[in-house]
Amino acid sequence: MTPVADPDPSQVLELLAAFRRSKVMFAALKLGVFDILAKNGHTADEVAEKLTTHPEAQRRLLDACVGLGLLQWDGQKYRNTAAATAYLTQESPQRLTGYLNFSNDVMWGLWAHLDDAVREGTHRWKQVYGWDAPIFSHFFQTPERKREFLMGMHGFGVISSPHVVTAVDLRPFRHLVDLGGATGHLAVAACRQYPQLRAAVFDLPDAVPLAEEMIAATEVADRVSVVGGDFFVDPLPPADLFALGRILHDWAEDKIHQLLQRIYAALPSGGGVLIAEKLLREDKTGPNWAQMQDLNMLTCTEGRERTLAEYTALLEHHGFTRVQGVVTPSPLDAVLAIKA
Ligand SMILES: C[S@@+](CC[C@H](N)C(=O)[O-])C[C@H]1O[C@@H](n2cnc3c(N)ncnc32)[C@H](O)[C@@H]1O
């Protein structure tokens, strides 16, 4: 009898190790490895001394970081790769450290109960942290956690927003209001790209100080204001274009309808709504980034990711027309719809 060859186990083995690799990066970040190596290379012993870690264990972690392409080793000293310096150091304007720390400190615990989330169809805040309140009160529990979360959003935002605002034509619009705009990266990217545009970032009052700080540091600060408020309750500032960046995927269907209804009512005829989310393919078989984000929404929000057809149905239900979706090479895609 011809022996049947075993199926290739590489995909299973790859996924078995995937969480370990994430944790290596999270631990090195949390310990401060990439900040220590931002300017100069150091030996393992020097890193261990600066970080007050166990020298041999530190060397093992550094070697793993070399294996993962986050550090380089010249036979004596360890150095950051260019990507580590750009995305994993506190001083870098492109840092993703907020989102990474949030992933390690908060989401890791929620994801540990993904099986329960699938059983029950709900997020895990109460099970893991004992918190039973509206979702953003969890993110904003302490000033440090709030800043960390918003800076995490910012890290992804600065990568994505320049793609989102150029994926669709925003030249017809004069006044953008970015609802839940956090640090203002989308408003800033839009004002950089479109000289005719003025913008306001509308977010919860708790988010306003950081938004003001981040926007003040940009060259378009004179065209971007910040307004504190609750987009479910307070009057929306006047606009001919509202943006919703990673907002609709946070909320249950009834709240999405409430928000879209308010936006439609506030817009003039010809006004638009710009949605920045990662689009699932119509058959939902990918892209994997969007699928993982969808499960992330399951573990930590009321919401989910959608296909363009699903966004179109939501938007058309409220009277929007000319729905246009553009996939970008960044973590977020663009959907633009117009009020007839
Ligand atoms: C997932 S973050 C997205 C932030 C930003 N749009 C981005 O893409 O980086 C959601 C944002 O919505 C804000 N937010 C949540 N509930 C809100 C509400 N009821 N009114 C106004 N903003 C709200 C949060 O403060 C947070 O900045």
Image (cartoon, helix red, strand yellow):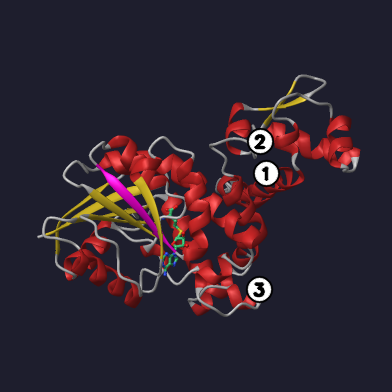
Whether label 1 touches label 2, CB < 8 Å: yes
Residue underneath mark 2: 68
Residue 299 in the image: state x and y as whole percent: 53, 68
Mark 2 element type: loop
Earlier in the chain: of badge 3 and badge 2, it is 2
**Secondary structure predominantly adopted by residues drawn in magenta:** strand
**Residue 51, image x, y percentages:** 84, 40
Residue 246 visible, this angle: no
Residue topped by disc 1: 25
For disc 3, the marked residue is 129
User: Does mark 1's beta carbon lie closer than 8 Å to ligand 1?
Assistant: no
**Which region is colored magenta?**
197-203
Distance CA(mark 1)–CA(mark 2): 9 Å
Task: Inspect the image, locate mark 3, and give the three-letter code of the amino acid beneath it.
Answer: Tyr
Q: How many marks?
A: 3
**Viewer-nearest of discs 3 and 2:** 3
Given residues 69 and 181, the one toward you in this image is 181
Q: Quadrant of ligand 1?
A: bottom left
Left or right of residue 299: residue 28:
right
- The residue at 58%/33% (across/down) is 86
Q: Residue 122 — which label?
A: none
In this rendering, is residue 119 above or below 186? below
Q: Amino acid at mark 1?
A: Met
